[in-house]
Amino acid sequence: MSRFSTWVGIALAGALGLSLAGCSSTGGKRAEDARAAAAARGGAAVDTPRWTFAMITHAGDGDTFWDIVQSGAEQAALKDNVRFLYSHDDEAQQQAQLVEAAVDKKVDGIIVTLAKPDAMRASLARARRAGIPVVTVNSGSAESKEFGALAHIGQDEAIAGEAVGEELNERGREKVLCVLHEQGNVGHEQRCDGVEETFDGTVVRLHVNGTSMPDVQSAIEARLQSDAAVDAVVTLGAPYADTAVKAREGAGSDAEIDTFDLNAKVAAGLKDGSLGFAVDQQPYLQGYEAVDLLWLYRYNADVLGGGRPVLTGPHVVTGDDAAALEDYTRRGTR
C-alpha cells in the first residue's frame, strides 16, 4: 500500500461467572456463533487440554475498538481449544476486582490491559503468586515486564504519537488539537507526548468527556471556533473521529481531522476525504496474538519479545489505503 508506514518491535465470585462469560453486548452471541461454526468444521485445530483464559480490559460500554480485540481473541481461542472469558470495566478499581476474581477462579491464563497501571499492580501480583501466566495487551508496555507479565502485545504509544507528528509535518500543519477522551489513561498522554516530540508546530491538548459524544462534539467545536489557527485535530480513538468531523462542520473550520485507530467509518472517511489519515494498531491482532501466546506458553513454554513489547503498530493509513481495508473493517477485523 502507498504510504503504509510500519514500526515493528522485537518483538470478580458469582458475578464473574456472568461478566466473564460475555460482558460486552455482542461478545457472547458472537462467541457462540463462532463456536458453532468451528464445530461444523470439526472443532479446534489442536488436541491440547481445554485451558481457560480470561481477558479483562479497561473498555467502556459501546467502544467498538474492543469488539475487534475480542473478536481476534475469540478466533484464536477457537483454534487453540481454549475456553475464552471476557470482561471489562473502564473504572480501574473495578477492572482490578475482575482480575482478582479471575485469579480466584483459577484460570489458566490472564490477558489484561494496563491503562491505569497503579490500580492493577496488586491484582497482578496475586496472579503471579498463584502461578497464573499473564500477558498484557494494548496499554502498559512500560509496566508489563515490571508487573511480571510474559510479554506485552500492542503498539508503543509514544512511537505512535511520533509517527503522527511526522505525518502532520509532511502535510504542512502548524497547530494541532490533541483530543484526550479518557481521564487518567497513561497511554493517551503518551500519544500526545509523542506528537509533541516530532511535530514542528504547536500541540494543544483538549480533555473531553469521552462517555458523551455530544459533549465531545461541543468541546471540539468551541475550541475550533475560538482558535482559528488550529489546522489539525487528532482524536485518540476511531469512534471520536466522526464526531470531530461534525464539530469541524459546526465551527466552520477547515482543520484536517486525523485519528488513532481504525473502523468502518474511519475507512469511509479516509476514502471520501473527510479524514486525513489514521494510525492503525491492529486490535484484532492484539487479541489473537495474546491468546496464541498464552497457549504457546502453556503448551511449549514459548515466549515472545525477549523482554521487549511485541508491536502491532503504528501503521499510518491514508485515503490511498482505504479501499483495500474496507472489506476488513466492514467485517470487524480491522
Image (cartoon, rainbow, N blue to C red):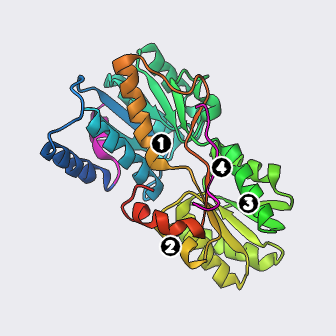
Q: Work out how far the residue at label 2 is from the one at label 4, CA to CA, in angstroms.
A: 24 Å
The residue at the point 24 percent across, 34 percent down is 45
Choose the circle earlier in sequence order: 2 or 3: 3
**Magenta segment includes 46:** no
Quarter occupied by the C terminus? bottom left
Question: Label 4, on which residue?
Answer: 188
- For the residue carrying disc 1, how many other residues have a C-alpha within 10 Å: few (<14), some (14-19), or many (20+)? many
- How far apart marks 1 and 3 lie (CA) works out to 24 Å
Classify the position of the N terminus by image quarter. Answer: bottom right
Amino acid at dot 3: Glu
Dots 4, 1 in contact, CB < 8 A: no
Secondary structure, mark 1, is helix
The mark that comes first in sequence, 3 or 4, is: 3
Quick one: label 2, few (<14), some, or many (20+) residues within 10 Å? some
Q: Residue at x 36, y 61 (%)?
A: 331
Where is mark 1, residue-wise? 286
| Badge 3 element | helix
Residue drawn at point x = 59 percent, y = 32 percent: 309
Kindly identify which residue carries mark 2: 268
Q: Residue 249 at what x, y percent from top left?
A: 64, 83
Q: Sequence-wise, which precedes: disc 1 or disc 3?
A: 3
The residue that label 3 is drawn on is 167
Q: What's the amino acid at mark 4?
A: His
